[in-house]
Amino acid sequence: MKYKILSAIISIVLMILLVGCQQNNTIIKPDIETKTVTENSEGDYITFSLDIPSNWKLYAQNYTSIACFSPDANKTNASENISPYKLSIDNYIIPSLMPIDDKYKQAYKDLFSGKYDGIKDLICDNIEYINIGKVIDSFPDVTFETPESIMDYFNILVDGISTPDVTMPESWNDKKWATDFTFSEYNGKNGKIIAVEYSYVIIDKTYKAINCYRDDDFSVCGAFDDDADLSSGDLALWVADNMEITKHYKIEDNMIKQEGVDY
């Protein structure tokens, strides 16, 4: 009898562990015509080689990232930070603009150790920044044609109360910007991949996205759209698996430097 009880306890523990991060080694290629393309990041710091749909296009974004665009992409739907018409491919440790906060670096390390609170907070922070950017975009245009117009602009920056149409809504206090997280682990062709699916809110509308983190510090991120024949979210995991990376840089003094270049 004691062995049956022990077996039951072990089964329950295993079920709890599996709920935390589903292990799935099957990465299915979308049923589409594809092509293998190679693209360098800006400055040729990184060479990316990957399979993408034959009618999607690849462009460099900055010195650590590229993006793949749907044929249905345009300046409106593909300019968003997260878009079903754009597949974003990046090195998530090397900062493109601002230094990576230590707590975010730790979140990435924890992710591959089965600890997910940090990555949840990181994603929520990113979505909040996107929403703040939406509000800032509603600021009036600034011409700087006269000293008065310059002063008016700085008054807006200093005194948000004077411009209620651009202040953050009270409903944003303690708002959960991303929810419904699921984590799946894959043994990819080039190492471990953790796929994080989640729902997120932009202003008052809810969307669904996926971030696929590879253990070589690169990620492939997309979003889902039920109305699209093929969205970036449908491609993210497959691209994360087949993508080959060649680095032409080194990190010295917390700076990225091209190999073979004297500084």
Image: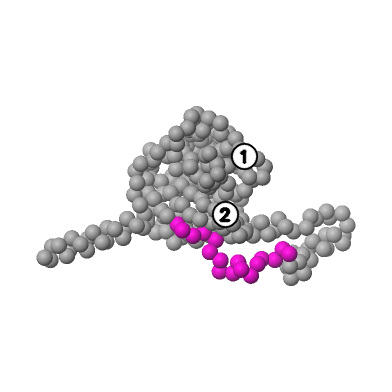
Residue visible at 65% across and 67% down? 169
How far across and down, in percent of the image, does residue 137 sit?
71, 55
Question: What quarter of the picture does the C terminus occupy?
Answer: top right
Who comes first in sequence, dot 1 or dot 2?
A: 1
Question: What quarter of the picture does the N terminus occupy?
Answer: bottom left
Are there few (<14), some (14-19), or many (20+) residues within 10 Å of tag 1? some
Are there few (<14), some (14-19), or many (20+) residues within 10 Å of tag 2? few
- Please identify the quarter of the rendering in which residue 141 is found: bottom right
- Say which of 170 and 132 sits in front: 170
Magenta part of the chain: 165-181
Question: Does 83 sit left or right of 165 as displayed?
Answer: left
Question: Does 107 sit left or right of 7 as displayed?
Answer: right
Residue receiving disc 1 = 73
Q: Amino acid at mark 1?
A: Ala
Q: Secondary structure at mark 2?
A: loop
Residue receiving disc 2 = 99
- Please identify the quarter of the rendering in which residue 60 is found: top right
Q: Amino acid at mark 2?
A: Pro
